[in-house]
Image (cartoon, coloured by chain):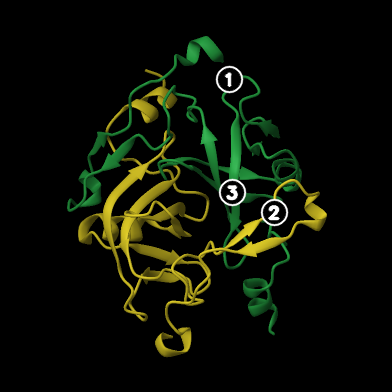
Chain colours: A green, B yellow
Amino acid sequence: MTDKKDLEENLAFTPKYDDEGLIPCITSDTDTGKVLMFAFMNEEAVRKTIETGEAHYWSRSRKELWYKGASSGHTQKVIEMRTDCDQDCIWIKVEAGPACHTGRETCFYRKIELGEASDDAKMHFIDAEKVFDPKDVY
Amino acid sequence: MTDKKDLEENLAFTPKYDDEGLIPCITSDTDTGKVLMFAFMNEEAVRKTIETGEAHYWSRSRKELWYKGASSGHTQKVIEMRTDCDQDCIWIKVEAGPACHTGRETCFYRKIELGEASDDAKMHFIDAEKVFDPKDVY
């Protein structure tokens, strides 16, 4: 097999990190299928997520390992962890508390109106109800 | 409002592109909630996606606008398009044909075994059935 074909078809997990040592991670709710957040993992975060079954990320703003829920209590139990064809992205399905620091279930709480020129693109709130008060947990 | 708060709470779509002019995009199946693929959009791809209601990306390998399905016929009708709290990621839900160039419905056709040290991490196929022959369409 070519290297590319091998990467696509074999069953050894060999994640491809970018120049900064990070791999993007999509996190969705295992029950609803909703995408909750998008973040990055470094090698340590990937390892800890696999070993503990709880989501760990790399915080690019704080430049440190980020055990999701460490400060908010909203940890994420990983039900399934997948990678994509070229192993440069991770998708985890989690049993979730609210994921967004704004107090919402998901970070994706606004939808973009389709059919308009994007210079004028408007958005509407969706899934935007606040389920906790950020001031109480951060 | 602070700039950050404004970005999070207002309804003007002002996507934040990275240094290469790209924004990551998560694409999921509107019916099943499965993540199908992860790719990037540039400003033109975002605009065309909004205007046409069909998914457009930026191909980093070919360095060109990528109208998904142009060669395979597997276009993606966008049912909903969202952005996240800091507007640096896009999530689209699509009515999908198969998304993966390997012939599968989703690029995420392998799951990683949890609970093992990641040096030994093994994977298993899931949703890995080929639904078309890549040789026929590319």
| A28 relative to A63, above or below | below
State which quadrant residue B125 falls in.
Answer: bottom right
- Kind of residue at disc 2: Glu
Q: Chain of mark 1?
A: A
On the picture, is B60 further left or further right than B68?
right
Kindly identify which numbered label has been placed on residue B9: none
Which residue does the numbered mark 3 point to in the structure image? A80
Q: Which mark is residue A72?
A: 1
Marks 1/2: CA–CA distance: 27 Å
Q: Nearer the viewer, residue A78 or B43?
A: A78
Q: Which label's residue is closer to the chain start, 1 or 3? A: 1
Q: Quadrant of residue B94?
A: bottom left
Chain at tag 3: A
Three-letter amino acid code of the residue under disc 3: Glu
Secondary structure at numbered mark 1? loop
At x 29%, y 41%, the residue is: A111
Look at the image and tell me in which quarter the N terminus of chain B lies: top left
Q: Is residue A138 left or right of residue B4?
A: right
Q: Position of residue A81 (x, y in %)?
A: 61, 50
What residue is at 17 percent from the left and 53 percent from the top?
A115
